[in-house]
Image: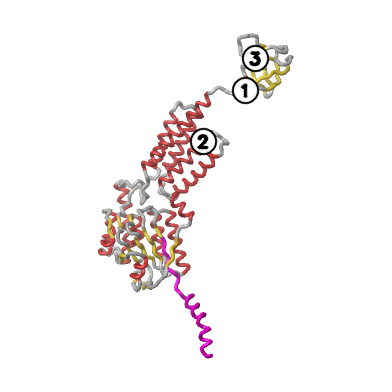
Amino acid sequence: MRRAPLLLALPALAALTASAAPPPAVVADLNTEVHAVSADFLVRTIEDASKTGAPLVVLRINTPGGRLDSTRKITQAILASPVPVVGYVWPPGGQAASAGFFVLMACDVAAMAPGTNAGAASPVGGQGEDLPKTIGKKVSEDAAALLRSLTEPRGRPADLAAKTITEAVSFSETESRDKKLVEIVARDLPDLLAQLDGRTIRRVGRPDAVLKTADLAWSVTVMTPLQRALAVIANPAVAGLLMLLGLVGLYAELQNPGAIFPGVLGGICLLLGLFALSVLPTNWVGIGLLLLGLLFFLLEVKLAGHGLFAVGGAVSMILGAVLLFYRTDFAPRGELWFLVAAAATTAAILAVLSYRAIAIQSLPDRTGDGVLVGLVVAARTAIAPTGKVFADGTYWDARSETPVAAGQSVEIVAVDGLTLVVRPHTDPASHKEPS
């Protein structure tokens, strides 16, 4: 009987032990270009891990690079995090290039999977082109200073890391470990956690910490559907295409008021395109040239510019596509020729629509006052000074300064509201509207 209370306490003891289990490590993936959307996702992940008391954050990195301002936002969040952050280049075949290398070096522990590489952090322009000498030196020096501030506090070779900027070198996982740029080469996440257990890490602005990761569970944090959609839209080619589709839809709606569908579709595409441009290294001169091209095509229709406005619109759109992502920072490499081809196609579509609108305007009137004036019809009643005529399929009130007998031919000389102004007509060769 004395064992009964002990047996009854076992379930409560087990529940207490389970509740005392440490929270899982948080795992998040950086598998897109580094831009405002991915930066916001990683910053929120790190902040949420701190609030929930997670013992560790693992950033799995596989990125070709991205924007320098977004990179700084991520590195600042890593350095300020009370929770240790581990950067892990994964999966095999992945890379931490350009801005991704900065994120890796900012982490408390840097690790790589077999078959990965890191480095090649030289600043380039928005299309991957080399920067002008003076600007390139300025940006390179700024990037090198940032990289030194990330590597030196953790004992990583700052001069070697700087070569990824000055010489655009890249290192395999074994080269990175041998040169002490990274601390661990791990096959997978369980292997990484096993190698981290008991490791003392050097933190920036905080005391050294000892990691306890043996048998540590983990949970993967993923982007929300909205964030994933925005990340896709933030691709330079997609952003440029949305802008061009928006311009075509807007043009079609302005040329055909009330069509509704082109305006709705164009408005949605235009707003999505503007959002994407807000998170990309956009040159606003490029956007201005695209809008100027649309204005030129509208003027071609309204002012009949004999093709000059259309030519100007095509040139403006192509130049706008070229300059759209021309910036001097760690910009993603926009598909320049794709955008130029899309802009040229858009210009051709707008040119066809413009000349079609001009051709329609040159057609003779089929309804309205222009159809009635000059028409010869028969008076249905005597007009002295008013009466009735039948014209354009309906009966009209008519008036004439000269009396007209019923059945006599009259010519319509003007339209005054709902009354036709007529005069007697005696030329038998003239056209008469069928009775």
Earlier-in-chain disc, 2 versus 1: 2
Instruction: Give the image location of residue 287, x and y in percent.
Output: 44, 42
The C terminus sits in image quarter: top right
The quarter holding residue 402 reads top right
**Which amino acid type is marked by label 2?**
Ala
41 versus 305 height, above or below = below
Work out whether 297 lies above or below 426.
below
Residue 317 at least partly seen: yes
Q: Is residue 152 above or below residue 314?
A: below
Question: Is 174 a magenta residue?
Answer: no
- The answer to which quarter of the image holds residue 59 is bottom left
Q: Tell me which numbered mark, 3 or 2, is placed earlier along the sequence.
A: 2
Which segment is the magenta one?
1-28
Residue closest to the far front? 1
For the residues labelled 2 and 1, the Cα–Cα distance comes to 27 Å
- Mark 3 lies on a secondary structure that is strand
- The residue under label 1 is 369
Residue 82 seen anywhere in this rendered image of the structure: no
Residue where numbered disc 2 is placed: 252
Q: CA distance from mark 1 to mark 3?
A: 14 Å
The 10 Å Cα crowd at callout 3, few under 14, some 14 to 19, many 20 or more, is many
- Mark 1: give few (<14), some (14-19) or many (20+) Cα within 10 Å: some
Q: Amino acid at mark 1?
A: Asp
Q: Position of residue 189 (x, y in %)?
A: 37, 65
Residue, disc 3: 411
Which kind of residue does numbered mark 3 sit on? Glu
* Kind of element beneath mark 2: helix
